[in-house]
Image (spheres, rainbow, N blue to C red):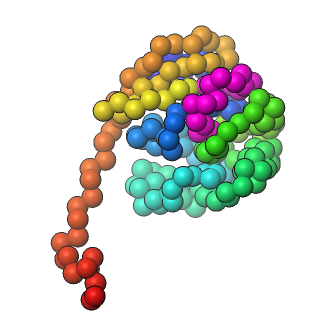
């Protein structure tokens, strides 16, 4: 995928829209983990804003993510989410932010893009497919789709480059956890 991007990899800062219905394509976390590891800096934070499920810290730690510099921000109100994103981006204290929003208008996208440039921060923003009909002034727009061995990524828009057809990405599969051996733990005394 890096060869298809204008920067030969992820942009240094700005807003990257990750568009796909649902909470995100299965395996997308594995796609982003190398980016989180590469962007770890001792003086800057990494944020998860409004994730659809509780982040599983042991899996992040096993992947080499420094948990002492990773912050999970849980806010349900859309205005709180946008406020958190804009101020975190502008602060210059974050190297990378991964967020989930139910929608985004063109003016909101522009404000977030300007804030990300000001703070030299990369914002990865999960959005539903309904935003594809809108034009957003962002650095990169990727449409994600499921596939049995990972996902497909289609570059819809990128500064300094052209859109591309869908690229199939094979992502590592994590094995299913083994069920507990002692069934009485699950059944309880009742």
Provide the residue span drawn in magenta.
124-141
Residue 81 point in image, percent of width and height:
72, 51
- Report if residue 5 lies within the magenta region: no
Taking the image as drawn, is residue 4 in sight?
yes
Looking at the image, which residue is at 28% across and 84% down? 188
Front residue of 104/84: it is 104
Residue 55 point in image, percent of width and height:
50, 57
Looking at the image, which residue is at 47% across and 25% down? 153
Figure check: 182 above or below 118: below
- Report if residue 126 lies within the magenta region: yes
Residue 112 point in image, percent of width and height:
76, 37
Figure quadrant of residue 73? bottom right
Q: How many marks?
A: 0
Residue 178 point in image, percent of width and height:
23, 61
Name the image quarter holding the C terminus.
Answer: bottom left
Figure quadrant of residue 160? top right
Figure quadrant of residue 11? top right
Looking at the image, which residue is at 67% across and 17% down? 159
Outermost residue on the bottom side: it is: 189
Looking at the image, which residue is at 75% across and 33% down? 105
Residue 64 vs residue 133: left or right? Answer: left
Front residue of 4/152: it is 152
Figure check: 61 above or below 17: below
Taking the image as drawn, is residue 13 in sight?
no
Residue 89 vs residue 28: left or right? Answer: right
């Amino acid at each position: 995928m890096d060869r298809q991007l204008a920067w030969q990899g992820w942009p240094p800062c700005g807003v990257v829209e990750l568009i796909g219905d649902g909470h995100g394509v299965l395996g997308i976390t594995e796609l982003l983990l190398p980016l989180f590891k590469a962007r770890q800096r001792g003086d800057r934070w990494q944020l998860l804003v409004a994730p659809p499920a509780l982040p599983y810290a042991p899996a992040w730690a096993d992947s080499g993510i420094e948990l002492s510099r990773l912050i999970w921000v849980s806010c349900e109100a859309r205005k709180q989410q946008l406020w958190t994103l804009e101020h975190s981006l502008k602060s210059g204290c974050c190297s990378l932010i991964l967020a989930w929003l139910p929608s985004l208008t063109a003016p909101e996208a522009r404000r977030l893009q300007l804030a990300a440039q000001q703070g030299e921060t990369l914002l990865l923003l999960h959005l539903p497919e309904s935003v594809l009909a809108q034009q957003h002034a962002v650095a990169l727009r990727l449409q994600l789709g499921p596939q049995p061995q990972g996902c497909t990524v289609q570059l819809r828009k990128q500064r300094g480059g052209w859109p591309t057809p869908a690229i199939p990405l094979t992502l590592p599969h994590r094995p299913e956890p083994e069920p507990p051996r002692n069934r009485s733990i699950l059944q309880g005394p009742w």
